[in-house]
Amino acid sequence: MEGRINQSRRDFLKVAAVAAGVSAVSFVAVSRDELKKLLVPVRVEDLIAEAAEAGSPLERRAQEREAKLKQWCQAEAEKICSSMGEDSEACKEARKRCAMIKVKATGPREGVRFAMALDVNKCIGCRRCAYACVMENNQARNLGIEWIKVLEIPREEMEIVYANMHYTDAPKPNMVYVPVACMHCEDPPCTMVCPVKATWKEPDGIVVVDYDRCIGCRYCITACPYGARRFNWAKPYVPVTELNPNMHILGNVPRQIHVVEKCTWCIQRTRDGGVPACVEVCPVGARVFGDLHDPSSPIRRVIEEYGAFVLKPEAGTRPRFFYFFGPKRTPPREPGTERETGH
Amino acid sequence: MTADGSFLDTIKFIVREALLNGGRRYYLALIGLLIVALYGMYLWIFVQHAPIFLGKEEGGLILTDLSDSVPWGIYIAFFVFWVGVAAAGIVFGIAAYVFGDKEFKKVAVLGEVQAVAAIITVLLLITVDIGRPFRAMILMPQLPNLRSMLDWDFIVLTGYLTLNLIGMLVTVHYYRQDKPLPKKFIVPFITIAAPFAIGIHTVTAFISQALTARPIWNSPLLAPRYVATAFASGPAILLLALYLAERYMKGFKVDFSVYKKTLYVIVGSLVVGLYFTLSEVHEIFWYTTEPMKKAQAQVLFLGYHLPYLAKMMWLWIGLGIAAVILGILPRVHNSKKGIILVSVITIVAVVAEKTMTIIIPAFVPGTLGEVHPYYPTALEIGITAGVHAIGILIYLLLARPALKAVMTHYFKGSGAHH
């Protein structure tokens, strides 16, 4: 009996060794592409954002959120109305916005890859995009969160170490203004590091955060080379009179405390065929937005016409936010001013 | 009690020895630590306050000095340090069961106790740092996302914690009954635990090492540097604990060779750690293609924007060299007092090296060149102290029963419990 058990144990070990060897060899022998196909991690969009299907978990959550938001908004509006009078401007505004609240869960469209480009020659550093973004995306008014940061960088050396984002007057002739927000990278490091898969890249290239899953470890802030992510260090506050009622569950629904948020290229607008608020508001038309896969889109035209570059290409994230030097500058460069005010 | 006893009896023995069998001084220490721990916990609830417990709208991590520019601060800094201390807990085990040193077998269990206490400290530090701890508790087992180093870290840390708890329990179980540890247990245990110990600290380094966003962490030397200095500070704390145990536990004696051999490990690790620092300094200040890395190194070594970082860094270099020189002087390393002195210097040096100086410079200047200085607030320091009090409490509670069991086996008839 003892001998037979030992024999079978030995046989088992032999078979296991052979199997391990064969699998190792076949693992190496498979072509690189095959291997890549095999080693693709779980597709998060399969797991979470089946938003296109009706009655998906995301859609259900959006409906729940909408009901809750309406409740909260009406309570806030009551407060305003009782303190400022029923026919005050603020009361009417609040009531109107509460009635309009709609939380969507629109899914990505097939075959779309959004991209944005910015003409560094045109940008005057007025920061209107940052303000429009705050209003559009219901960013906390009490925490100073802005998704778009505008860097002032010396024209002769576009190096981020010399950037200044706290400038007071613009434009200066020897400076360029580089607005930076989420780059919606092809290989976003932030989504890779998230321990709970609370952030991922949608098929149309928008990197989103699920505020109901985020645990607030801030690893994604640490991983982002563009400083694009913001953390709600306290409970965010948005006055109902300024609430944007057009919301997306993964975009601009009012955030909770201790979650990370970021630019979503106004997912609530672009998924319905619009353009982001920053593009719309830009007074000099420096921003271009479109579908990278569509040959007739403006983004393709500017890249082909002028050529583009990205910030920090060495980070290997392949951003889909491009910068280019367009045809002319606003305001026109005055001769002789460049050297005098050099940094 | 039956002749061989069950594990339940062992747990009862540990609880009894930990809680019911101490002198006045022991209880005073327990109560003191408990007060600090409770105060820290109170502060933490005060910070987290609103969102989870009371439903109010005040509070939140905004009460700390952390910001989007410096999202990780003193909590994560000490997290790194204690992971190292936990990893080095295995040193005594390796000396005892890999190299078969008889004297180390008597104290190997202390390393396991230290690892347990340090890892609990580590996990608590993470818990106080994250914004939504209760959500994390629910999501962690649901979604092991193996692309994230944080998940790997969680897995190896809890794995190592379990391993050391088992190791400690089995050791106490056998020694309590005056039996040697069975080979069937100790060989696989050391085979798994030793690489695990290196693994926890390596994974902790990998959390930050590969982030392209933070150039000063982008050094392949980070993980080896972590491990090297860990193997200086961990054994130093073990020696300190041994020294205190010898002083305060009647009849507990350790051979001088334990101290001396551990000192070799400490001095060797310090030399390697200092050498790695030198290598990084050379790379950064002689030639680097990354301007941001250079700017961050200037914060670290020259104290631009944050003078305390430079002080800590030079403290590490100065005290590290001092500890090495003292350690190789025969007059110092031939006396117990001298070895304890070297240990204390080493602990201070490694705390200076592996806490704030690792975490903060990566954020100043930030990814977009923004400078946002970070000074830990009194609140954060209080919470950190509270977490450390819990760690020391656990160390104290577990070390006494473990060492008593060791005494039952190795020092028969010298006042040990029987």
Image (tube, rainbow, N blue to C red):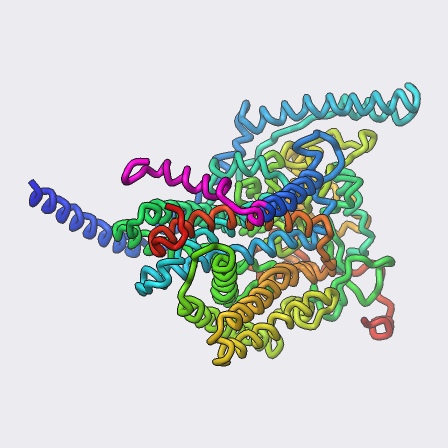
Q: Nearer the viewer, residue A311 or A243?
A: A243
Determine whether B323 is above or below B350 in the image.
below
Question: Is B159 one of the magenta-colored residues?
Answer: no
> Where residue B141 appears, x then y in whole percent?
47, 37
Determine whether B228 is above or below A19 in the image.
below
Instruction: Report the predominant secondary structure element of the magenta stretch.
Output: helix
Question: Is B9 one of the magenta-colored residues?
Answer: yes
Q: Is residue A120 visible?
A: yes
Q: Is residue A85 left or right of residue B155?
A: right
Q: Is residue A32 left or right of residue A147?
A: left
> Where residue B114 appears, x then y in whole percent?
48, 53
> Where residue A220 appears, x then y in whole percent?
60, 49
Determine whether B325 is above or below A9 in the image.
below
What is the quadrant of the C terminus of chain A in the image?
Answer: bottom right
| Number of numbered discs overlaid on the protein picture | 0
Q: Image quarter for residue B260?
A: bottom left
Q: What residue sits 33% from the left and 36% below the top? A: B1
Q: Is residue A131 left or right of residue A7?
A: right
Q: Image quarter for residue B314?
A: bottom right
Q: Nearer the viewer, residue A46 or B362?
A: B362
> Where residue B298 appears, x then y in whole percent?
68, 71
Magenta extent? B1-27
Q: What residue sits 77% from the left and 61% below the top? A: A164
What is the quadrant of the N terminus of chain A in the image?
Answer: top left
Q: What residue sits 66% from the left and 51% below the top? A: B71
Q: Is residue A308 visible?
A: no
Q: Nearer the viewer, residue A57 or A17?
A: A17
